[in-house]
Image (cartoon, rainbow, N blue to C red):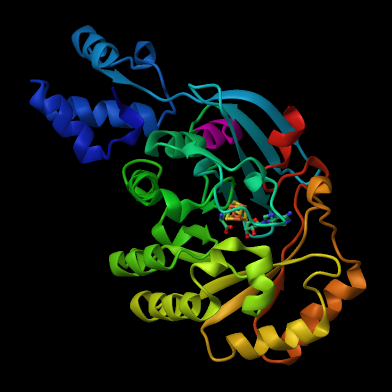
Amino acid sequence: MKDLKELKRNELINEFKNAGFPSYRGEQVFNWLYKNGVSVTEEMKNIPKDLREYIDENYKITDLQEKNKNISKDGTVKYLWELEDNENIEGVYIPFPESGRHSACISTQVGCGLGCSFCATGIDGLKRNLSAGEIVDQVLKIQQDISGDNFLEPRLSNVVFMGMGEPLANFDNLMQAVDIINADNGLNIGMRKMTISTAGLVPEINKLAETNDQIGLAVSLHAPNDRLRNKLMPINKKYNINQLLTAVINYIEKTGRRVTFEYVLRDSLDDSPELAVQLADLLRGINCHVNLIPANPVPELNIKRPVQKVIDSFYSTLDNNGIQVTLRKEMGSEIDAACGQLKRKQR
Ligand code: SAH
Ligand code: SF4
């Protein structure tokens, strides 16, 4: 059965038109889904009974079930949802009161097949890809949760694909979802307000560059040389740093957008001043910025956060070497609002 939440607006209109309903009916249904946050046909008040029955018989409408929700003191909210097949995924809402941004961090797969040595999501491997509808519905669920009586107030302004899974390993569903989230008569979140985080799938980065969708790209680099990156991220044995940077430079040239490199700092693993200098040398001249992320501890993997002095010194070394660098503000750390950790604690 097709899922209404995996259809673009024009696809949805055409489906109903082909079944003999006028086009404005499709528009109305689209509005119920994306302007009112409705997921069941009974609540689609202006839709006649015959169309509601037609939908119920021929389509499903993904409706993630909230299993758990944790609210942090800084306003960050972490959600755990159950899918139709009882698998769980998570998403995070992050408010930025200073800038007025409201950001949703969402998942693209159940688990992940890339097995990075520091990541809780990868421990059990990949279960399956999320459908476009399951990706879209995470945004809808967060939007619904942050808004009061009026579904789109306040409005989510940003979406980052940095939850569970490797977004570019689920390319087609991801791009379909991006299109739906972007639709200007729906959630209307601009392409430039969305960011895909990837561990470095080179062919897909090139494919993304071709679409020139203006979507933000964040690359999980995490090490400045192949020897270390091979150890931390098995994907590096398939696409090494040189190949990855070539694809990133191509992305920058095609889209004109500055790329973010993510670098997780783990105690005694990748946090030395020598590595900071190597990183600066590697990235010099590339239109990018580095986002330093102090590691979220993963006890099973023996991952620890470095002490603040080491973090500060890594930051200054990059800064002094002319690299634009930011330190990720730790949001929601007391609720483990990152990287597969809530899900693991549930079991
Ligand atoms: N698979 C994609 C997106 C999901 S992971 C990717 O790897 O980029 C999102 C981010 O969380 C990545 O930068 C990832 O490296 C980071 N991450 C994974 N485990 C972490 C941990 N223990 N502490 C901090 N960040 C972590
Ligand atoms: Fe997968 Fe990203 Fe975790 Fe690596 S860091 S295992 S790519 S989710």
Span of residues in magenta: 141-147
Residue 169 lies in magenta, yes or no? no
Q: Going 42% across and 25% down the picture, which residue do you hit? A: 62
Q: Going 65% across and 34% down the picture, which residue do you hit? A: 79
Q: Nearer the viewer, residue 105 or 121?
A: 121
- Left or right: where 41 falls relative to 95: left
Residue 177 % position (x, y): 38, 44
Quadrant for residue 52, please give it: top left
- Left or right: where 228 falls relative to 113: right
- Left or right: where 141 falls relative to 10: right
Secondary structure character of the magenta stretch overall:
helix
Residue 263 % position (x, y): 68, 69
Total number of numbered discs in the rendering: 0
Residue 204 % position (x, y): 38, 62
Q: Nearer the viewer, residue 136 or 183?
A: 136
Q: Nearer the viewer, residue 187 or 283?
A: 283
Residue 142 lies in magenta, yes or no? yes
Q: Is residue 198 visible?
A: yes
Q: Going 68% across and 53% down the picture, which residue do you hit? A: 97
Q: Is residue 219 visible?
A: no
Quadrant for residue 121, please give it: top right
- Where ligand 2 lies, by quadrant? bottom right
Q: Quadrant of the N terminus?
A: top left
Does residue 227 lie above or below 31 as drawn?
below
Residue 347 % position (x, y): 73, 27
Does residue 81 lie above or below 282 as drawn?
above
